[in-house]
Amino acid sequence: MIDFILNLKTRNETLFYYGLICLVLSGIFIILAKYTNTQVYNVNAWYKPFKFAFSTFLFAWAMAWYCYYLPNFNIRLFNWSVIILLGFEIVYIAFQASKGQLSHYNISTPVYAALFSMMAIAASLVTLYTAYIGLLFFTNSFPNLPNHYLWAIRFGIIIFVIFSFEGFAMGSRLSHSVGALNDNSNWFIVGWSKTVGDLRVSHFIGMHALQVLPIFSYYVLKNTKLTVALAVIYGLLALLTLIQALQGRPLIKTSNTQNEITNKM
């Protein structure tokens, strides 16, 4: 792990430190969640900024590692695009959490509606930039990379991009739930609904293909066919959880699901 961290710092010092800052912020947010009772939609308000900060940390470090392989790539532009765009999201989400107010789906005032739209634009721009990087991994040659690892990066980016844009399904509904309004359950931090469909499940699974597929391919599978098979299974898992959510069904049903749904009506 120490070797990886030192290597990452050498590859991309800017995103290394940005990711580190996001990791520290995620730690601060989880501490605030433990010692404050502010809630939004029946969950601690600080869970959302924690999730976004930690997810940004993982994204920044993953892309810092992958972009190092790209020839003639303007890494400085990409770095600052990620820092500014995703940094804006984290700051606004944390600010709203401190007030116990919604950041996402909040169109209660023209200002909040504009800021919500700006977050959507910021996330879309980062996703499009990542899609462009994925294209570069297809159009360039990488003779020094194992073929299975290269395909893992390609598939990881493809699935990430698809299920990042799935966020529009939530934004258009102004809700991450299907069958209730922004339902949350006590699934620790993720808070996925146990009573209705939850679009965040497939969003989470798909976006983290960016880390899961290359790690498993490089360290465990070490085979191109197995990597492709894993990518297909992983993508199907994300797709099936999306279909399940759109049908209004939770990821895992509990024994009192029907009673809880009845109480919400």
Image (cartoon, rainbow, N blue to C red):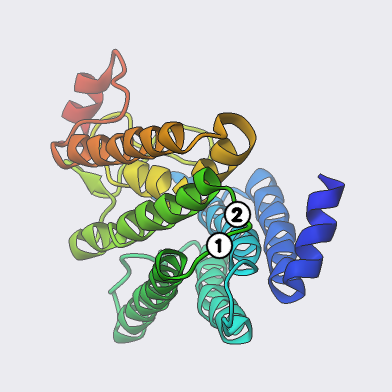
The front one of 212 and 50 is: 212
Q: Amino acid at mark 2?
A: Leu
Q: Amino acid at mark 1?
A: Phe
Q: Is residue 180 left or right of residue 75?
A: left
Residue at 56 percent of width and 36 percent of height: 216
Residue 161 got which mark?
none
The front one of 248 and 159 is: 159
Instruction: Determine whether label 1 and label 2 are within 8 Å by CB.
Output: yes
Image x and y of residue 127, in percent: 40, 69
Image x and y of residue 18, in percent: 70, 70
Residue at 57 percent of width and 67 percent of height: 94
Name the residue beneath numbered marker 1.
142
Residue at 80 percent of width and 66 percent of height: 9
Image x and y of residue 184, in percent: 37, 40
- Residue 206 versus residue 88 in the image, above or below: above
Which image quadrant: the C terminus? top left
- Residue 222 versus residue 174 in the image, above or below: above
The front one of 62 and 202 is: 62
Q: Secondary structure at mark 1?
A: loop
Name the residue beneath numbered marker 2.
145
The front one of 216 and 165 is: 216
- Using the rendered view, name the quadrant where residue 46 is placed: bottom right
Say whether residue 186 is visible: no
Residue at 63 percent of width and 57 percent of height: 144
